[in-house]
Amino acid sequence: MPRDPLLRAWTALIVLCLGSTAIAVAVGSGLSKTALTAAGAVILTLSWLKARLILNAYLGLAAAPFWRKGFEITLALYALLLLGLYLSPAI
């Protein structure tokens, strides 16, 4: 693993993107309705992790704890809202 925080963040972003892509390919191969819903939730969660990583590493919020906490709370609430809207038809 690289020592530079930006390279570590870039590596993590690549891994998260590969995970999202692998799940999307699996969805294209045909899944049950429950598995399809779970796959969508996992893709949304991976997107949330990528957004947090970009905010912390590339926009420098890791050095500003007050602003980081505010952005993380806002981002988490937004992700939960999107997840709720995504899962609501499945209920």
Image (cartoon, helix red, strand yellow):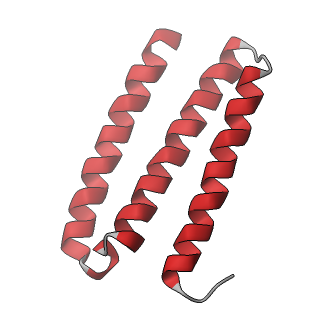
**Residue that lies at the very extreme toward the bottom in this rendered image:** 3
Q: Residue furthest right?
A: 29
What residue do we see at 48% from left, 20% from top?
87
Q: Is residue 12 above or below residue 37?
A: below
Question: Left or right of 74: which side holds 39?
Answer: right
Q: Residue at x 56, y 78 (%)?
A: 7
Q: Position of residue 19 (x, y in %)?
A: 68, 47
**x 33%, y 31%: residue:** 81
Above or below, comparing residue 17 to residue 1 in the picture: above
Q: Is residue 6 above or below residue 90?
A: below
Q: Quadrant of residue 57?
A: bottom left
Q: Quadrant of residue 24?
A: top right
How many numbered markers are drawn? 0
Q: Is residue 10 left or right of residue 88?
A: right
Vertical relation: 36 (above or below) 66: above
Asked if residue 69 shows in the view, the reply is: yes
Q: Residue at x 62, y 69 (%)?
A: 11
Regarding residue 91, the answer to whether it shows in the image is: no
Quadrant assignment, res 33: top right
Q: Position of residue 89 (x, y in %)?
A: 47, 10
User: Residue 10: horizontal and vertical position, in percent?
Assistant: 55, 69
64 vs 80, nearest the viewer: 64
Q: Is residue 31 left or right of residue 41?
A: right
Q: Quadrant of the N terminus?
A: bottom right
Along the viewing direction, whichever of 72 and 1 lies nearer the viewer:
1
Report x, y in % for residue 17: 61, 50
